[in-house]
Amino acid sequence: MAFPTSRSTPNFGTSHRNHSKISLHALHLQATRFVEEAPVFTHKSLSSIHSAFSSLYAMVLVTLFLAFSYTEVVTFPRFHHYLENYGFYIYLYGVADLFFIYVLSIAIWSERKKTVLDNLRIVLNHKSHGCLPARIGIIFFGCGTLIYLILELIAFFMTQSSLQCYHSTDGANSILGILFVLLQACLIFMYPRLNLDTCNFLDGFGTMHVVATNIIVWIHSIISESLYEFEEAEDHRLESVPTNVTNMGCDFLGERLKGVYDLNHRCEKNKVNIIGYALSKMEHFLYPFIIEFALIGASVFFVMWRHIGRHSHPSVEQPHLDVKIHRPRPLEFIKRTAWDHSLKGAVAGIFILFLAVLNLVLFFNAEGAEHNNSQAEYFSKLTKILINVCGILALVIGIWQIQFLEDIENIDKAEAENRNLDTALLRFTSFFAYLYQCFTIITGIFNANANGFPVQLHDLNAIIAAIQITLQLVFIFDLRWKKLPQNDSDTKPGRQVAIFMFFFNIGMWLVFTFEIQKVRSSLVEAHFYGFMPWVIIQRVTLPLTIFFRFHSAVVNIEMWKNIYNVHPASQHE
């Protein structure tokens, strides 16, 4: 019997290995072809993707906070302080604090390096992301914010742990919030010109997280201030501002706010009297500090986010600038700043600022009886009319004078972006300033029962204010694109008006921040619209109107410093 030889025996193992080699080879060819044909993500593309995701991340944080804030109100007391109690603010403050420590560590390390060429992880921009008034403001408003957080922390330690009002996360929120204020103020004041280029992903998400945190703090302060206005009305029971106005759109909100008011009063009884009394008396004065601190922080870090990855290398873009990391040089800045053609405008502006402060003093001294409140409102509107008329006259003169300046033909791309950002912010916030004046005009036109108050004063006040806002925008938008003539740099037309408008807007900012936000400064409007509707109108329009005034002051002082300065001093700020 013949057996088959080994040559005729099928070798299944060898055939399977050959098939596997062919499959792997084909797969390798397909992978190679895919890699060769696949698009290459350039550095610019990756930067755009990082920017998109980081901005969306910030948007998600803000929208989440807004949704939960509304839910807390309409479902009270089920979700009262839900975000605060379950770690949302710990996450916000904690991540922001870690990012601040990270940036400050690299900035300090880079500042101590001896060579400029190795200093590429963080470089200096050719101008500050936050101008000098903004940096002074971050310290001033930061002090008020610190006082508020310290009082909250002390009040937390004075609350008994067995009570419903006690939450362990409140103490952590206050401690991390204090650290947040200190680190942000230090970073903006000491290193205002940082361009981050360490890791696009980390830099983008870190800066936008800080922006979102500041916006959330801003919105939270507005909500808290609105609640305080309601509590104040409940305490004083102003007859001229009825709190029981029937309004279908606001009844549920009033009921929820009343519940929050009752709960807060029950909690205050369980705290040491001196701390609870100090916090309750000071918080409505400290809210504007928190709001402005958050707005400055958000604006500075938003500009920093836009400059991620940009270099101001001395051999490439601007060879005359020292880009080695350093702190501001105030003495060199003062020496290089031109102070001429400013005395008259500064004196007139300080006088307007004095009128605004006098208005505030008389307003708060009139607190009490309805008769005094009406007189305070009457005097307040007369003072604002006088201040706005002075502003209109100055702006007309300024618009005429700046026509003697030359138009800017060519401008650096980064500088054009900064100027366009400023104008966009002014356009957006001026909308709310106009909206507030429209509500005031409607009150004057359709309110015939103002208890002897001259309603024509409302129309005149609002119309003059709207004219002043319009002329101010025209003045700023025109002067932003002007420069001194090369053959005549001694006259400096319009500089007196620029410094005057700086003090003018600071004065109006003070009035809107500490007076106009109070319901009793607009009793006629509150009576006409109803208490709760008018509070909502104020909370929608006034925060951005206040920002419009502050940003207008910043832009005017920047134009006064840069446009009329023959020797630029921005690199020493």
Image (cartoon, rainbow, N blue to C red):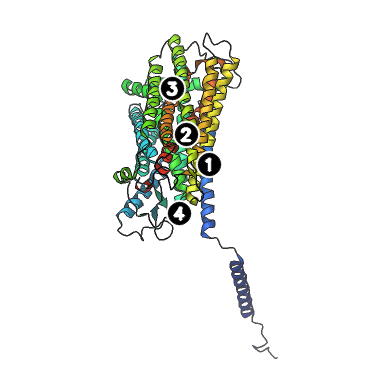
Tell me, for residue 59, which label it has, or none. Answer: 1
Type of amino acid under label 3: Glu
Which secondary structure, mark 1?
Answer: helix
Q: Earlier in the sequence, mark 3 or mark 1?
A: 1
Tell me, for residue 310, which label it has, or none. Answer: 4
Question: Residue tagged by mark 2?
Answer: 398
The reply to whether dot 1 and dot 4 touch (C-beta < 8 Å) is no
Which secondary structure, mark 4?
Answer: loop
- Depth check, mark 1 against mark 2: the one in front is 2
Question: Above or below — where is 429 with respect to 418?
Answer: above
**Along the line of sight, the residue nearer the viewer: 194 or 156:** 194
The CA span between labels 1 and 2 is 40 Å
Q: Earlier in the sequence, mark 2 or mark 4?
A: 4
- Indicate left or right for 138 with 451 as reference: left
- Depth check, mark 3 against mark 1: the one in front is 3
Question: Above or below — where is 141 with respect to 366?
Answer: below
Type of amino acid under label 4: Arg
The crowd level at tag 3 (other Cα within 10 Å; few <14, some 14-19, many 20+) is many
Q: Residue furthest bottom?
A: 2
The reply to whether dot 3 and dot 1 touch (C-beta < 8 Å) is no
The crowd level at tag 4 (other Cα within 10 Å; few <14, some 14-19, many 20+) is some
Type of amino acid under label 1: Met
- Indicate left or right for 536 with 134 as reference: right
**Along the line of sight, the residue nearer the viewer: 53 or 305:** 305
Q: Earlier in the sequence, mark 3 or mark 2?
A: 2
Tell me, for residue 515, which label it has, or none. Answer: 3
Residue 160 x %, y %: 35, 26
Q: Earlier in the sequence, mark 1 or mark 2?
A: 1
Which secondary structure, mark 3?
Answer: helix
Residue sitting at x 33%, y 26% = 158
Residue 9 visible in the shown view: yes
